[in-house]
Amino acid sequence: MNFEGLLLGAGAFLCIGIFHPLVIKAEYYFGVRSWWAFLCVGLISAGASLLVENVYLSIFLGIFAFSAFWGIGEVFKQKERVEKGWFPKNPKRKYK
């Protein structure tokens, strides 16, 4: 039996589970300018994925990298959701 596919699927599920609340919190505290952090994390993870010799860790880092890249677009969508009133605004932050 091969459990690698299930482990990598669980890793992808974990990445999505991590980035979903991160996007919400990043937009709440920093606004859309937080997209740079997601870009940096994605680029670092993608680079690490290319350098790691273990194939499963490399795949997981690639999944993590593209989850971070996905987060960039979601930060901007989260701003729209906040403007629609679906999520709370941060009262301490100025909105443009």
Image (cartoon, rainbow, N blue to C red):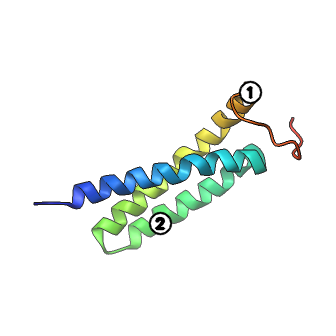
Rendered residue at 31%/57% (across/down): 8
Question: Relative to 90, is 18 on the left or the right?
Answer: left
Residue depth check, mark 1 versus mark 2: number of the one nearer the observer: 1
Q: Label 2's element?
A: helix
Question: Relative to 1, is 70 on the left or the right?
Answer: right
The residue to which callout 2 is attached is 47
**Mark 1 / mark 2, whichever is N-terminal:** 2
Q: Amino acid at mark 1?
A: Gly
The residue to which callout 1 is attached is 85
Question: Relative to 53, is 35 on the left or the right?
Answer: right
Q: Residue furthest bottom?
A: 53
Query: Would you call the spot at circle 2 few (<14 residues within 10 Å), some (14-19), or many (20 or more)?
Result: some
Look at the image and tell me in which quarter the C terminus lies: top right
Q: Which x, y percent locates residue 53? A: 32, 75
43 to 83, vertically: above or below: below
Q: In which image quadrant can residue 73 be found?
A: top right
Q: Label 1's element?
A: loop
58 to 20, vertically: above or below: below
Rendered residue at 61%/60% (across/down): 40
